[in-house]
Image (spheres, helix red, strand yellow):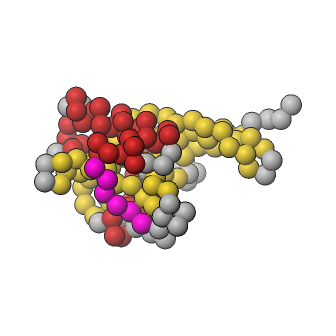
Amino acid sequence: MSRVEREFSAGGVVVRRFRGRPFLAAVRLRRGTVLALPKGHPEPGEAAVDAARREVREETGLDAEPLGKLDDVRYFYVRDGRRVLKIVSFFLFRYRSGSVHDHDDEVEGAEWVPLEEAPKALSYVGERQVAALAVARAGAGQDGAAVE
């Protein structure tokens, strides 16, 4: 029986208002064909929320303030013939400063997506679900500062 390896990452949903409308920051991958949320592996000793904040800064060029955890996304993939359970913890962030034009070269681009369109626009099912949670929080006024 093959053993399942575990892998952990952390990511962020950065929300900002433009002309009264909430948007989230997303990144383009794989020659621009994939629209995803910024995420990556924590460095040794780094807390998940700090890793998410760092990944947001690196991949989107944005400085953001964490407001709380949204959810964990879990999925399996195969690496070198072994099954890997990947868990990605996503956190909600409020935009503080920076520009999506200042992303690093890990991604092909970064952009603002209307928050209400994100649950359909993002490429990965789990990330679409996380975006839907962010929409629900914004609509319910939870973490309301996130979208002000």
Q: Quadrant of residue 120?
A: top left
Coordinates of residue 70 in the picture (x, y in percent): 39, 35
Coordinates of residue 37 in the picture (x, y in percent): 44, 50
Residue appearing at x 39%, y 55% in the figure: 26
Asked whether, in this view, residue 31 is left or right of residue 135, the answer is right
Coordinates of residue 72 in the picture (x, y in percent): 49, 35
Asked whether, in this view, residue 59 is left or right of residue 8, the answer is left
Asked whether, in this view, residue 66 is left or right of residue 129, the answer is left
Coordinates of residue 109 in the picture (x, y in percent): 42, 66
Q: Along the line of sight, which residue is nearer the eye, 72 or 117?
A: 117
Q: Along the line of sight, which residue is nearer the eye, 120 or 13?
A: 120
Asked whether, in this view, residue 108 is left or right of residue 83, the answer is left
Residue 91 within the magenta-colored segment of the rendering: no
Quadrant of the image containing the N terminus: top right
Q: Which residue is situated farthest in the right direction here?
A: 1
Q: Which residue is situated farthest in the left direction here?
A: 19
Residue appearing at x 45%, y 61% in the figure: 28
What is the tally of numbered marks visible in this picture? 0
Q: Which residue is situated farthest in the top direction here?
A: 140
Residue appearing at x 36%, y 33% in the figure: 133
Q: Quadrant of residue 60?
A: bottom left
Q: Tell me if residue 10 can be seen.
A: no
- What is the chief secondary structure element of the magenta stretch? strand
Q: Start and end of the magenta stretch? A: 109-114
Q: Quadrant of residue 128?
A: top left
Residue 111 within the magenta-colored segment of the rendering: yes
Residue appearing at x 24%, y 36% in the figure: 138
Quadrant of the image containing the C terminus: top left
Q: Is 72 located above or below residue 7 in the figure?
A: above
Q: Is 2 located above or below residue 8 in the figure?
A: above
Q: Tell me if residue 114 can be seen.
A: yes
